[in-house]
Amino acid sequence: MRILAVVGLVLLSSCASWTWVKKSAASPVTGQQRLMLAPPDWSGVMVDGDAEEKWLAGQDADWRKEWPEDKQNIATALESGIKARALHHVELVTLQNPDGATWVVRPLIREVDTGGYRPSTLVVRAQLVDPQGNVVEEIEAQGATRNVYTNFEHRIAECASEAGGNIGRYLADRTGK
């Protein structure tokens, strides 16, 4: 029985909700009360395996018209997920109203898999940027949905919320609260 408990703990501890891209030896934001949250950066995003511009050119007029709104909905769900998970650990403020915050969390949307009849996924990197503008840490978080029976807007918002929650977990861990 004790062996099963140990195996279970090892499995749980190895299931991180993010992966490290760049990690500082010690958390540079331990004890920070506020961090600025930048809007998501979409430059370089791949959609269904293609550069966004190429993918969009292959879509019908309705999809091309709806894409800017879809991107805004992804950004909103991502921010909500980050804030909900980090809520009791650190306050996230805007770049325009830093309220004493000097560090920035910069989300980078890397991959969108729209799914179709497959699961939808969203891959986001989050950079922790120091007051001098240097990227000190970077993680990669993912959100996925297996439900292929709902519309794209719902599926991708679920993915964004999950990825945001994973970034929020990272922030809670690194602020040490």
Image (spheres, rainbow, N blue to C red):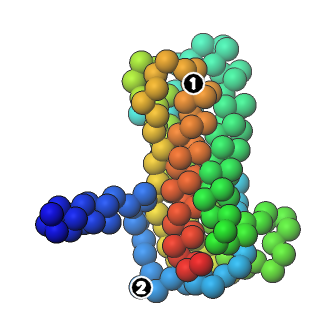
- The front one of 110 and 166 is 166
Which of the 4 image quarters holds residue 34? bottom right
Tell me where residue 123 appears, x and y as whole percent.
47, 46
Q: Which residue position is annotated with label 1?
A: 152
| Residue plotted at (59% across, 78% down) | 177
| Residue plotted at (62% across, 27% down) | 153
Tell me where residue 30 appears, x and y as whole percent.
58, 84
Which of the 4 image quarters holds residue 25? bottom left
> How many residues crowd mark 2 within 10 Å: few (<14), some (14–19), many (20+)?
few
Residue 129 visible in this rendered orientation of the protein: yes
Which of the 4 image quarters holds residue 106? bottom right
Three-letter code, disc 2: Ala
Which disc is residue 25 wearing? 2
Three-letter code, disc 1: Phe
> How many residues crowd mark 1 within 10 Å: few (<14), some (14–19), many (20+)?
some
- The front one of 105 and 131 is 105
Residue 133 visible in this rendered orientation of the protein: no
Tell me where residue 9 appears, x and y as whole percent.
27, 66
Tell me where residue 112 appears, x and y as whole percent.
50, 37
Disc 2 to disc 1, C-alpha distance: 40 Å
| Residue plotted at (51% across, 56% down) | 166
